[in-house]
Image (cartoon, rainbow, N blue to C red):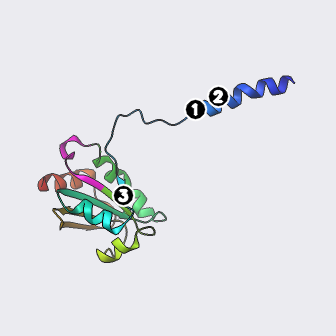
Amino acid sequence: MLRYLLFIPVILLAVSCKKEDISGDTKVLRTVTSLSEFESEIGAGVTLVFYHAVWCTKCAAQRPAVEALTKDDAIKAAAFLQVDYEKVKEVVTKYGVQGFPTIHIYKDNQLKHDLSGPGHTQAELTALVKALL
């Protein structure tokens, strides 16, 4: 019986612990789920698109620099999207993405920058986006 009484607080503690976003950041790398959504998003303004595949280790290495852009106040007017190759293949095919990771930067539906492979720094990406704003 004592064992059960000790077990209850442990369960309550585990249930009460949950991950919360306390950063206050509302801007995120939004996930595109369809071709129509993608085309709507790139239609106006500056949009950075991160094309990736979940299994891609080079994509995982590039991700932190891309995600950091969403928190940069200097480029807050831009939109930041991600396209998962396996979930939205029609976007990848239509927009000619050949490998991963790929970063496209659009302004008013026009492709302005096409960056392939890993190794693009946050500073480099910020400068490219900022120049288009």
Q: Amino acid at mark 3?
A: Gln
Q: Amino acid at mark 1?
A: Cys
Nearer the observer, 56 or 107 = 107
Please state which of the two labelled residues, at mark 3 or mark 1, is closer to the viewer.
1
Nearer the observer, 100 or 76 = 76
Highlighted range, magenta: 72-80
The quadrant in which residue 35 appears is bottom left
Q: Mark 2 and 1 residues: CB-CB less than 8 Å, in contact?
A: yes
Give the mark nearest the N terminus, 3 or 1: 1
Q: CA distance from mark 2 to mark 3?
A: 36 Å
Q: Quadrant where the N terminus lies?
A: top right
Q: Residue at x 74, y 27 (%)?
A: 8
Q: Is residue 111 visible?
A: no
Q: How many numbered circles are shown?
A: 3
From the image, tell me which residue sits under label 3. 62
Q: Residue at x 36, y 60 (%)?
A: 32
Question: What is the x, y in percent for residue 42?
Answer: 23, 62
* Magenta-drawn stretch contains 81: no
